[in-house]
Image (cartoon, rainbow, N blue to C red):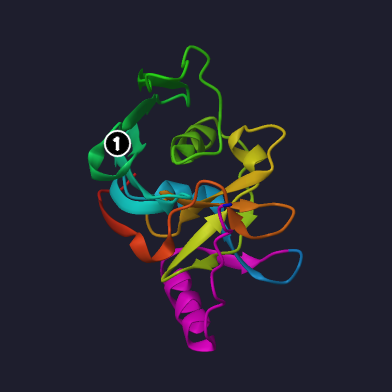
Amino acid sequence: MKSTIRVLRPTLFASLALAAVAAAFFPIGRSEAGDASIDVTDWVARLPTRFTVEGGKSEPTYVEAINIDRRGDVFTAVGGAPAWEDRAVETVNVDSQGHVTHLVCPSRLRCDNTRPSVSFLSSAWLLAAYRERRYLGRAIPAPYGARWVICLPAERIGVTEAVLDPCFDLQTGAVLAQRHRLSGRFDGPSLDPGSIRISSGGKS
């Protein structure tokens, strides 16, 4: 059985460092619970328009290689067995009004009804929600290995009846993990924290 990913809490020094970085680049306020939080709409507006993510996702008998890519309005996720065998490619485009369409569909899936989903392509649905002027609210960054993520209720990007919520890299907006809303743990399609390599550039 696949084990749930657990991530250690940050040290006090790391927490203070995050607060300094966030205060420098993102509007920080006080949520109703009294915790520092980020305005998600403003955060999305500041994200880079290009990123590349490489990582691995542990399976029972192997580590699945995952690549996630953004080039402006086009988002691509590539996954599959080791050594680039039997790789599945999915690509979507987000137009200026927030409509999402498939450009490339995995061979084993049907993509005729493009609907919001919790997956490694949730970054596209986040951008779509932003362009549709959907309410995105505020969120508190959480540690994920050496990086920080913002986990949003899946309903904010248009997903209904979700159990997992997508968690976006604080610096790029790339989906790195999913968090189970009942247990609060990172679960489901999540990259192993130590395997993550990210490069980015450009601004929205």
Q: Residue furthest front?
A: 61
Q: Hey, what amino acid is under mark 1?
A: Gly
56 in relation to 140, above or below: above
Pointer 1 residue: 72
Question: Would you say 152 lies left or right of 55 here?
Answer: right
Q: Which residues are magenta?
A: 2-31
Percent x, y for residue 53? Answer: 31, 50
Q: Quadrant of residue 71?
A: top left
Q: Residue at x 48, y 72 (%)?
A: 23
Q: Residue at x 45, y 41 (%)?
A: 120
Percent x, y for residue 6? Answer: 56, 66
Query: Which is more toward the observer, 128 or 13?
Result: 13
Question: Would you say 64 lies left or right of 187 here?
Answer: left
Q: Residue at x 61, y 45 (%)?
A: 136
43 in relation to 26, above or below: above
152 in relation to 111, above or below: below
